[in-house]
Amino acid sequence: MRKFSLPILYLILLFISSCDIVDLPLEKPVIAPIDTNDTTPGNTDSLNGVDENGYPLIDTNTINNLTQKVYMEEFTGHSCTGCPTQTDLLLAMQADHEGEIIVATFHEGVFAKVELPDYPTDMTSDYGGQLHSLVESSIDAYPSALVNRKTFTEFGNKQVFQAHNEWQGPALSEVDKTNPAVAMGVGAILNDDMTSVKIRVSTRAEINLADEYKLLVLCIEDSVIAEQKDGRKSEAEYPHKIVKDYTHRHTVRDQVNTSKNVYGETIIDAAGLTAGEWVDWTINYSIPDNIVDAKHIYIVASLINTSTVEVVQVEETHVHLAQ
């Protein structure tokens, strides 16, 4: 971790690599490999994009400093009959506010258990279990969701919301909020043999920060094909209403941080950070065994105020292929 008091120019990695699974809910991304042999920063007209150690570079002139994005953390399970309907509504809301809502989905709780022969796939994660345990007493039903980990006095003084009719209001109340406390850029480069990812998160204070802040970084695999019960399906076509090739979105696989704290690791200490200063965080992350297709990995980074335990900013990036 390093602090910077002056602006630095890096090249943000916004190009998207390819996916192999067909019929995805979203349009397939396009291959845009990064030339990892070129370490020259500052030329935004080319695919320059790594430092001398092969870590991605962030264009600090173009990162989002206008809005605080919304972080939705959903709890679901493959045997939850009504979960697909609610997830579709969540994804539709995300699409309506493209780029402003980031979703992480945890398969935890009673409906996420492996049960043979119908539900053989373990979609849970160690980090998901840790977060689920933290808020489980507030979960009345599934699916449930957190919104920026805030407690909303105007929405029943709740932090955990059951289904779309509850979480929509808090989520939309957070969309398009201006003047964020921090700006953040995230880059991730997948190595040639697809066993590790070099990740950089660069954070700039937009105002003077006087509290401690933790950085939480998660490894998410999108479009995982596995079984899911769906109450909308015909029993005749889908025995027990189980879809064997359901596309699971935004599945959390692992916590990237070496410190496995539910809030992440401290990158801004209690002394705070002066407006305009930077914190730079990098890691060479080994891809966990539960990843089915490394090209489907997203890295999600959120900054959490340790005092309020609320998310003050969140960003995501698809992994990029080194060439």
Image (tube, rainbow, N blue to C red):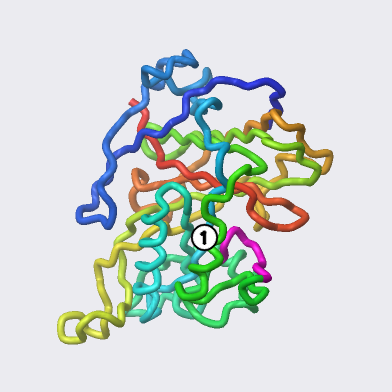
The magenta span reads 146-153
Query: Which quadrant is the N terminus positioned in?
Result: top right
Q: Where in the figure is residue 2, as x and y percent of width and height?
A: 69, 28
53 vs 130, left or right, is left
User: In front: 160, or 93?
Assistant: 93
**Per the image, is 148 magenta?**
yes
User: In front: 133, or 307?
Assistant: 307
72 vs 297, left or right, is right
Amino acid residing under circle 1: Met
Q: What secondary structure prevails in the magenta region?
A: loop
Q: Where in the figure is residue 79, as x and y percent of width and height?
A: 38, 79
Query: Which quadrant is the C terminus positioned in?
Result: top left
Residue 317 in sight in this render: yes
Residue drawn at 27 percent across, 37 percent down: 30
Residue drawn at 54 percent across, 35 percent down: 185
In the rendered image, which quarter is residue 48 located in? top left
Q: Which residue is mark 1?
A: 72
